Image (cartoon, helix red, strand yellow):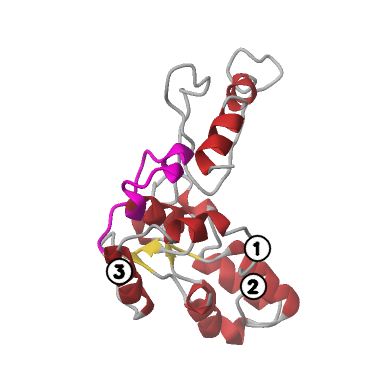
Amino acid sequence: MERSDVYNKYFCKYPVIFLSLKGNNENLEKALLVGVSRVAKSGYLSELNNLKVFPMHHEVFANYFGFTENEIFMLLQHNGKENQLDDVRQWYNGYRAENSLNLYNLWSINSFINEGNLKAHWIDTGDTKTIKDLLWNSTEDFKNNTSMLLKGYAINVRIMEDMDYNMLAQKSNIDNVLWTLLYYAGYLTKDKNDNLCIPNMEVSTE
């Protein structure tokens, strides 16, 4: 089945779910949707057009996307690992949120504290098939930028604020779709100049 067919098959089911989240539901006070990519909220009969989206590069709630530096120090100190702070920074720090706030990967930090090993705990925690499939259609420019990233450089590319999954079936603008997915999936972050870069050693090893 083509990706576009899958999208169309399941997309029609979401308005029913979204409708239950709206304000006329007397049994629901608040709802929180958490995911990797932005929600396609607008559109005719979307049933979810009054929605606030707060990505990591937005100031509101930015510090809740990961552990802050102070929280990391307290966690390491509590578990007798404060002497490994520099190594932990190198492996798991680097996600830049709004106001130059640096965040640590939540899953990786918890895994490190529980297991005691500095390694790529994040690998295989999610399905990357969508990204891998899209890579086959990426342009030469995308491949050149990827090479720059792997060499430690930052790249100046645009993150799409209005992407939805229907775009995954289209061949046009595939590079920007890929950069957007990689950013929201945690493979990339923004530096102080809003350019994209690889955040830490953990991601580099993958």
Disc 1 element: loop
Rendering coords of residue 10 (x, y %): 61, 32
Compared to 156, does 165 lie above or below?
A: above
Question: Quadrant location of residue 110?
Answer: bottom right
Label 2, residues with CA under 10 Å away: few <14, some 14-19, many ≥20: some
Q: Nearer the viewer, mark 2 or mark 3?
A: 3
User: What secondary structure is the stretch in magenta mostly built from?
Assistant: loop
Separation (CA) of disc 1 from disc 3: 25 Å
**Residue 34 in sight:** yes
- Please state which amino acid type lies under the numbered disc 1: Thr
Determine whether 136 is above or below 170 in the image. Answer: below
Name the secondary structure under disc 3.
Answer: helix
Q: What's the mark number on residue 168?
A: none
Q: Nearer the viewer, mark 1 or mark 2?
A: 1
Q: Kindly identify which residue carries mark 3.
A: 145
- Type of amino acid at the residue the image marks with label 3: Asn
On the image, the x and y values in percent for residue 108 come to: 62, 69
- Quadrant the N terminus occupies: top right
**Against 205, is 139 above or below?**
above
The part of the chain drawn in magenta is 156-175
- For disc 2, the marked residue is 121
Q: Looking at the image, do the residues carrying marks 1 and 2 touch, with CB atoms under 8 Å apart? A: yes
Marks 1 and 3: which is nearer the front?
3
| Secondary element at image label 2 | loop
Question: Which amino acid, mark 2?
Answer: His
Distance in Å between CA atoms under marks 2 and 3: 26 Å
Q: Earlier in the sequence, mark 1 or mark 3?
A: 1
Question: In this orientation, which residue lies closer to the viewer: 93 or 73?
Answer: 93
The mark nearer the N terminus, 2 or 3, is 2
Q: Which residue is mark 1?
A: 125
Judge from the rendering whether residue 87 lies leftward or rightward of residue 27; answer left or right: left
